[in-house]
Image (cartoon, helix red, strand yellow):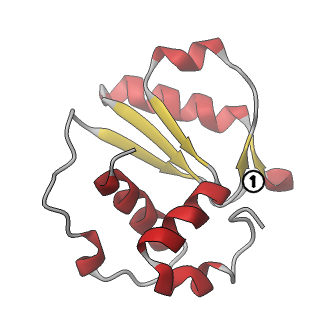
């Protein structure tokens, strides 16, 4: 995943959680390339696991919008199923443990803020 996409994901999750985000953190000289992206945030997950229905929802959104890629991000774990029909569109799944790593790497001063929330690989 390119650096600018990681920054977009980090900022997206911080905004979804209601945390203030400074625009300076989003500056990157390289724009996103390759078309439109759907970023789908899931903040609630039964048992701390995002189920396959959310993956299908993202797949359907990507198809309907003609997007180049769908990105599902969540502070929780994502179901570990191999679902053939999901391979029909380009999707990237970013579970909480990965989001934590991205925040720690690119926004280390915000790490303590995400500790107030469930998930994030803890």
Question: Could you tell me which residue is drawn at 31 percent across and 30 percent down?
Answer: 67
Picture coordinates of residue 116 (x, y %)?
69, 83
Question: Could you tell me which residue is drawn at 41 percent across and 84 percent down?
Answer: 20
Question: Could you tell me which residue is drawn at 49 percent across and 80 percent down?
Answer: 108
96 on left or right of 63: right
Q: Judge the density around disc 1: few (<14), some (14-19), many (≥20) Cα neighbours within 10 Å.
A: some
- Residue at far right of view: 47
Picture coordinates of residue 72 (x, y %)?
53, 44
Residue 26 placement: quadrant: bottom left
The vertical placement of 50 against 101, above or below, is above
Residue on which disc 1 sits? 45
Q: Quadrant of the N terminus?
A: top left
79 on left or right of 90: right
Q: Quadrant of the C terminus?
A: bottom right
Residue 10 placement: quadrant: bottom left
Picture coordinates of residue 88 (x, y %)?
48, 14
Question: Could you tell me which residue is drawn at 37 percent across and 25 percent down?
Answer: 64
- Residue at far left of view: 29
Picture coordinates of residue 73 (x, y %)?
55, 51
């Amino acid at each position: 995943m390119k650096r600018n996409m990681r920054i977009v994901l980090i900022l997206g999750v911080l905004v979804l959680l209601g945390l203030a985000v400074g625009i300076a953190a989003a500056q990157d000289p390289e724009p996103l390339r390759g078309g439109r992206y759907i970023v789908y945030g899931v903040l609630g997950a039964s048992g701390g696991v995002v189920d396959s229905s959310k993956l299908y929802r993202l797949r359907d959104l990507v198809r309907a919008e003609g997007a180049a890629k769908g990105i599902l991000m969540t502070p929780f774990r994502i179901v570990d199923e191999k679902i053939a029909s999901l391979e029909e569109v380009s999707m990237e799944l970013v579970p909480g443990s990965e989001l934590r790593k991205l925040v720690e790497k690119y926004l280390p001063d915000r790490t303590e803020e995400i500790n107030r929330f469930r998930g994030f690989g803890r």
